[in-house]
Structure formats: C-alpha cells, structure tokens
Amino acid sequence: MNAPDINRSIPRMHVAAVEQKHPTKRLGLLLRGSATPVFAQDGLDFRVEKKPGLDLLGLSQAEVDLSELLGRAVGIVLVSGLKGREAAECPCIVAPA
C-alpha cells in the first residue's frame, strides 16, 4: 500500500479539534490519489461526512486548519460529492476510532 506511516494518536487529536470547529465527521483516511487532487508525497486525504452548516469556505478552512496542525498537505473528500462508481470504490484505509 502507499499509505503514509504516521503516529495516529496526534492526528486523531487534531482531527477532533477541526471537527469541533467545522461541522464535519471523519469517516476514514483514503489511499493516496484515490479521490483528491493533493499531490504531496506525505499528504493525507480524508473521507468526511458533511454536517449541516458546512459551506465551501468552511470546508476550505478545515483543510487549511488540519494541514497546519498536521504539518502536511491535507485533502478532504465529502462523501456527498462522490457519485456512482466513485462512491462505491473510494477506499478508506483507516476507519475512525
């Protein structure tokens, strides 16, 4: 697999902080390049469920906030944005705790 090797306790803490600030719910970590245009080798792609009140600006800010906290590029894919085959084949490699 091409999944980055990371200590998961620190990212979980940062993701929880971003989830409190922005109305999202993390569903898992995606395989690199499977659904987002983040090309950094050490970047992380998250599959996220949108909660009421999240707009495009909030989603962008969530990516920036999480990227700054984790110290690497972050991409967020909304489940609601995946359609048909993409939705069925978008693989999560790490489920939330």
Image (tube, helix red, strand yellow):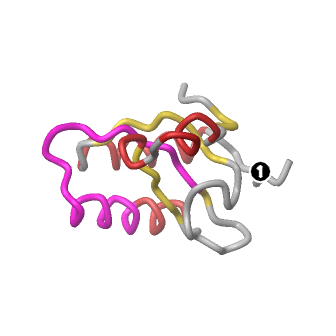
* Label 1 neighbour load within 10 Å: few <14, some 14-19, many 20+: some
- Answer whether residue 62 is magenta in the image: yes
Is 46 left or right of 64, judged from the image as shown? right
Give the residue displayed 24% in from the left and 37% down from the top: 51
Q: Position of residue 95 (x, y in %)?
A: 60, 29
Query: Furthest-top residue in view?
Result: 97
Q: Quadrant of residue 72?
A: bottom right
Query: Furthest-left residue in view?
Result: 53
Between 16 and 60, the one nearer to me in the picture? 60
Span of residues in magenta: 45-65
Q: Quadrant of the C terminus?
A: top right
Residue 54 lies, with reference to residue 95, above or below; the image says below
Between 48 and 13, the one nearer to me in the picture? 48
Q: Quadrant of residue 71?
A: bottom right
Question: How many discs appear?
Answer: 1
Is 14 left or right of 70, judged from the image as shown? left
Give the residue displayed 32% in from the left and 43% down from the top: 19
- Answer whether residue 39 is magenta in the image: no
Q: Position of residue 22 (x, y in %)?
A: 25, 49
Q: Position of residue 53 (x, y in %)?
A: 13, 45
**Residue that badge 1 annotates:** 3
Residue 73 lies, with reference to residue 48, above or below; the image says below
Residue 74 lies, with reference to residue 8, above or below; the image says below
Element at badge 1?
Answer: loop
Between 14 and 34, the one nearer to me in the picture? 34
Give the residue displayed 55% in from the left and 62% down from the top: 36
Query: Furthest-bottom residue in view?
Result: 40
Q: Position of residue 27 (x, y in %)?
A: 49, 34
Give the residue displayed 16% in from the left and 38% down from the top: 52
Q: Amino acid at mark 1?
A: Ala
Query: Furthest-right residue in view?
Result: 1
